[in-house]
Amino acid sequence: MMSPCAAAAFTLSPVCELTRPSQPESLSSLSSVGGDVFWTSTDWHPELFELILERNSDGTPSGVRITRKCALDGAVDVEGIARDPLRGTVWVADEQTMCIYEHDPATGKRLGTLDMPPVFKKFRATYGLESLSMRPDGLELWCANEEALSCDGPVSTREHGTTVRLARFTRKDAADGWHAAGQWAYTTDSIAGTAPFRACRSGLVDLCALEDGTLLALEREYSFKPLPSLRCRIYAVDRTGATDVSTMESLASGGFKPVGRKLLYGADTGTTMYEGLAAGPVQADGSRLLVLVSDGDKLLNRRTLVLRMAK
């Protein structure tokens, strides 16, 4: 069982930022397959890809290679992805349908659906399910909405962040179905730059569940400083003493304690919009890589950011 305390007894430091191939243009998610291999997906017209982190002779990351696997049958807007180590399948979070689907990674055929708790149906358009992560033992699945449900309060502004719900599902083994196992309130950063347009935002865009129970959260901001600019932050989540809000129909009036957060990494990323986060392989020195992929939609940069996690 996961400990509610995930104070993350490690630090994050940048290793390199790699320019990836121009196609696919938009990568919205990332999940580790093992070693330097990851699965990733596009959002609209969803397709599954294999992403390989290439190395120099000294072991340092040198580039990114991406190959197409398949189209994801019936998916509309995939924003989160999680490889299932027990079933050999892939689960995706669809922002438009607000459901989590299981697919065959070889053919893209849909195999099943995990319906979200009813409260998540009160999502705001384009602020719905944006993240998905499975603990490496395959027994725990996490997801969250990007900004507050309509019943839970306002979206982010320069004055305040937005409160979203971290939803947890568990199972006993590969044959067992997923069971809802709690929800916790998470309040994001406020918008740091100027926000003259409604498109400006600050929300939660991905999660990464580690073996020891640590849950990492990737936040993204879009604002003006004074030019259009993006910012990413990675927090460690701490559920110690936080309220399970799964029985609360609304969070707008308070009456709960949100999860704690510890900032591990933050950077202005200019025109690079990082949306996907996954833990990579352990290095020879005992540290571990953390990999981020960007959504290069339209004129945005297409990059992969590699960080080092070290105790």
Image (cartoon, rainbow, N blue to C red):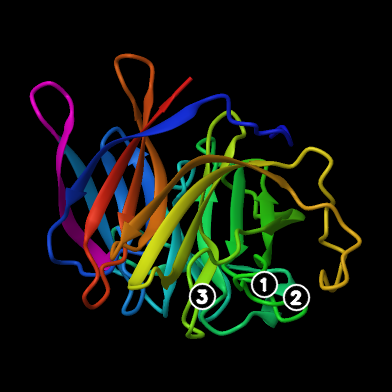
Q: Which residue is mark 1?
A: 148
Q: Amino acid at mark 2?
A: Gly
Query: What kind of secondary structure does the magenta stretch mostly adopt?
Result: strand
Image location (x, y in percent) of residue 81: 44, 58
Residue most extreme to the front: 226
Secondary structure category for the residue under label 3: loop
160 lies left or right of 225? right
Q: Position of residue 288 (x, y in %)?
A: 38, 27
- Dot 3 or dot 2: first in sequence order is 3
Look at the numbered discs 1 and 2 and tell me whether their residues touch, using CB distance below 8 Å.
Answer: yes
| Residue 243 point in image, percent of width and height | 84, 51
Based on the picture, tell me whether residue 61 belongs to the magenta stretch: yes
Specify which label sits upstream in the sequence, 1 or 2: 1
Q: CA distance from mark 1 to mark 3?
A: 14 Å
Q: In this rendering, would 239 be left or right of 192?
A: right
Q: Secondary structure at mark 1?
A: loop
Q: Is residue 46 above or below residue 10?
A: below
In the rendered image, residue 306 lying in the magenta stretch gets the answer: no
How many angstroms separate mark 3 from mark 2 (CA)? 19 Å
State the residue position of label 3.
95
Q: Is residue 51 visible?
A: yes
Image quarter where the N terminus lies is top right
Q: Amino acid at mark 3?
A: Glu
Residue 220 pos. (x, y %)? 47, 61
Residues in magenta, as a range: 55-70
